[in-house]
Image (cartoon, rainbow, N blue to C red):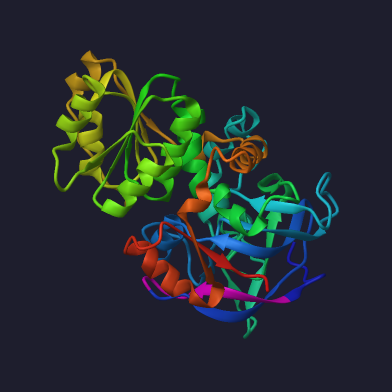
Amino acid sequence: MSSNSGSRDITAAVVRGKEQPFVIEQARLRGPQDDEVLVKIVATGLCHTDLIVRDQYYPVPLPAVLGHEGAGIVEAVGPNVRELKAGDHVVLTYGQCGHCNPCRGGHGAYCRDFFALNFGGDDGHGHTAITDAQGQPLHDHFFAQSSFATFALAREINAIKVPDDAPLELLGPLGCGIQTGAGAVLNSLQVRSGSSFASYGAGAVGLSAVMAAKVAGATTIIAIDVVPSRLQLAMELGATHVVNSRETDVIEAVRAITGGGADFALESTGRPEVLSAGIEALGGLGMMGVVGAPKLGTTASFDVNNLLLGGRSIRGIVEGDSVPQVFIPQLVTLYQQGRFPFDRLVKFYPLEQINQAAEDSTRGITLKPILRIAA
């Protein structure tokens, strides 16, 4: 499994230490084996998860090549690849084993080996595919791709073919952040036509949820944030109401707007106090989805009787509960129809400016950075 057959020189952004900046380095990547595909990366989205791993909120071993919203063109395939071929345009998404009960049931985001396959730093068997300029291994297989690089290896199951006429450099975030927000609304919560929906957080995930709620036919769509420019954009993307939580009591505002409480809500900030307030502002039989990822061990509190007597529920959601082979092409079609304009969230950076992109994302200047990688 560690053969260097078909290996090539690559350029990659490497994290070498906790809370340290990305370093652009020369490295070497082995060729594809088994059901793997080698992808020439055109562009990769920068996601909050990349940054919390850089800062070691999650215990991914370092040094590592991160990146998990890659989009590119298949360069070569392993001997057991069945459908993809060189030249195909693909979006890379999360890893899954494909054969445990959740995977077989169409819930690959809840794969029994999800953490090992996406955060383990190797192929699940202790092998890495990338070595640095000194020949030392770099941890990789991040979300089964490690796409902060000019080339990446993925498995056929997480390389999703998209139409050749779609703008490939734009599509990488559909593999994680955008599909998380949209999928939470359309797949997990199953927001209904005519219902009310509240998005706690108007970053890239929260605004993707706002756009999806509009697609779903929700008639009251509330965006909650502290950044006025984000709230303005939310109105342009489909929100019917906005709440600045620095200026207004969120629970009172959501109850007033919805006439008693939201039917559906999504928490994408990772802040436990925001989650608690969102649960309190649910209506009877309301459902709160949780996608914001804080540090491991973070707890939140809520009134148990408020949950019990109102028939309310809280749902943890990973990757928008999507079947990527189905859902990502659906999002591409919605975008091409003008019904899901996620390009409004994006700003492009060259790979060499990855640290600036990370800073702009952290400061809220850029909603969704995308790193252009191919010349």
Tell me residue 47's x, y (percent): 46, 57
Residue drawn 38% across and 71% down? Answer: 18
The part of the image, by quadrant, that contains residue 330 is top right
Q: In the rendered image, is residue 281 in sight?
A: no
Residue drawn 53% across and 56% down? Answer: 120
Residue drawn 26% across and 52% down? Answer: 228
Tell me residue 236's x, y (percent): 40, 43
Identify the main secondary structure in magenta: strand
Tell me, yes or no, whether the highlighted magenta stretch contains residue 16: yes
Residue, far bottom: 134
Residue drawn 18% across and 32% down? Answer: 253
State the extent of the magenta-drawn residues as a range: 9-19
Of the 4 image quadrants, the one containing the N terminus is bottom right
Whether residue 310 is situated above or below residue 358 in the rendered picture: above
Whether residue 44 is situated above or below residue 243 in the rendered picture: below
Tell me, yes or no, whether the highlighted magenta stretch contains residue 22: no
Query: Closest to the observer: 88 or 228?
Result: 228
